[in-house]
């Protein structure tokens, strides 16, 4: 009997799950459900405003990868589950399975009043293109950049890219000879933004902001955005362009299921990436709430590690073997500034920061090339 596995999502977690499943089992039948047979490499969007990357360079068609991996692609949006997860309901019909991996990513919380006045960079390539176009149009003014979290889910946050947009925009404006016409303001409800990267990283990031002449507005709860203004409980300041990364929660389609949820709205998971109380349903990446320290990152590297554990345990369950594979909790981040980068590493035993260097910028670009090579 050939087992049928459904993988939901074509992001880092979903594609890494496919790769690991096929590496471990050449015969299992894999169906991947996603709106498009494309990988959008979102870590590269930090370079779109400067022109270092374009949409065409960051969108990778997956047809060849699916052909090599012998994956059946089901082009659709997921709308729900039934029969204990054995049937995935989609906008293009049902997908039956013997085991399921949820890897549809997360959703940004857009409840802050006036959030329509801000651009959320990690919503996708189109958002980064809007930033690029606005920077080209602006002759001067104040650019405000910041992030917040999900108060019910400390790990459901993606703040790292905002540091990269901040330093990248600063470097770009200097390169264009017009930095003096702009004021850059970094804001966050957290008094120590980036604390999940570790104390040394916070100290380094704040020092780098000071060195670059970036004003900070920290430790004040956000109240709202107006057209041309950021309003917090600790005061307000003008902003001609607002870039803001809110906290993350679960996908809207989760609400149409009885999946167990975390306080922050993500799918609950155990250390083996299993969904508790559900038979052969697993979760990987931003969709899941996993046990671990509150600094555990929502990033591609962590999604890959979780996907590998989910795939191993899924196959073990299908084959009647013990399923005890866990994943490392590890943060690996290069905070890029368009031509230089700072390396941050953190695990359960140590926290390392290596100062800004051109080597790390090129290492980040080399990683992108190597990572995407398997899907091209």
Image: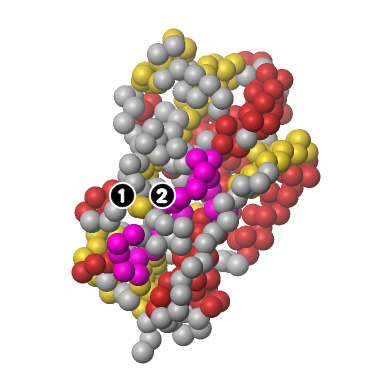
Tell me which segment is drawn in magenta.
Answer: 276-302
**Residue 288 lies in the magenta stretch:** yes
Residue located 50% across and 81% down the image: 25
Residue located 40% across and 39% down the image: 153
* In this picture, residue 303 sits left or right of residue 198: left
For marks 2 and 1 on the same chain, the one whose residue lies earlier in the sequence: 1
For mark 2, give the secondary structure.
strand
* In this picture, residue 19 sits left or right of residue 92: right
Residue 171 at x, y = what percent? Answer: 68, 29
Q: Which residue is mark 1?
A: 261
Residue located 66% across and 58% down the image: 369
* In this picture, residue 353 sits left or right of residue 241: right
Q: Which residue is mark 2?
A: 289
Residue 67 at x, y = what percent? Answer: 49, 77
Question: Local crowd at mark 2 within 10 Å, few (<14), some, or many (≥20)?
Answer: many
Residue 201 at x, y = what percent? Answer: 66, 32
**Image height of 350 relative to 304, above or below:** above
């Amino acid at each position: 009997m050939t087992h049928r596995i459904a993988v939901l999502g074509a992001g880092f977690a979903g594609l890494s799950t496919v790769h690991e499943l096929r590496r471990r089992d050449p015969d299992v039948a894999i169906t991947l459900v996603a709106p498009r047979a494309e990988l959008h490499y979102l870590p590269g969007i930090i370079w779109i405003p400067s022109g270092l990357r374009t949409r065409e360079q960051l969108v990778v068609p997956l047809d060849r990868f699916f052909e090599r991996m012998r994956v059946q692609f089901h082009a659709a949006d997921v709308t729900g589950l039934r029969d204990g997860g054995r049937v995935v309901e989609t906008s293009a019909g049902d997908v039956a399975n013997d085991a399921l991996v949820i890897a549809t990513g997360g959703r940004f919380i857009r409840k802050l009043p006036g959030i329509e006045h801000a651009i959320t960079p990690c919503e996708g390539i189109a958002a980064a293109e809007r930033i690029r176009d606005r920077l080209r149009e602006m002759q001067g003014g104040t650019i405000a950049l910041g992030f917040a979290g999900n108060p019910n889910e400390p790990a459901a946050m993606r703040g790292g890219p905002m540091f990269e947009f901040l330093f990248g925009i600063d470097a770009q404006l200097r390169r264009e000879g017009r930095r003096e016409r702009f004021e850059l303001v970094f804001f966050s409800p957290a008094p120590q933004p980036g604390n999940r990267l570790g104390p040394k990283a916070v100290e380094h990031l704040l020092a780098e902001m000071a060195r670059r002449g970036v004003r900070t507005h920290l430790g004040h709860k956000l109240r709202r955005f107006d057209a041309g203004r950021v309003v917090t409980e600790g005061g307000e300041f003008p902003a001609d362009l607002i870039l803001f990364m809110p906290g993350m929660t679960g996908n809207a389609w989760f609400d149409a299921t009885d999946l167990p949820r975390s306080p922050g709205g993500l799918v609950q998971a155990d250390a083996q990436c299993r969904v508790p109380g559900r038979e052969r349903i697993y979760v990987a990446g931003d969709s899941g709430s996993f046990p671990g320290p509150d600094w555990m990152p929502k990033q591609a590297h962590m999604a890959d590690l979780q996907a590998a554990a989910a795939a191993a345990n899924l196959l073990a369950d299908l084959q009647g073997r013990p399923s005890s594979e866990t994943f490392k909790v590890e943060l690996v981040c290069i905070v890029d500034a368009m031509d230089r980068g700072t390396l941050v590493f953190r695990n359960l035993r140590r926290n390392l920061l290596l100062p800004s260097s051109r080597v790390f910028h090129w290492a980040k670009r080399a990683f992108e090339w190597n990572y995407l090579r398997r899907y091209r």
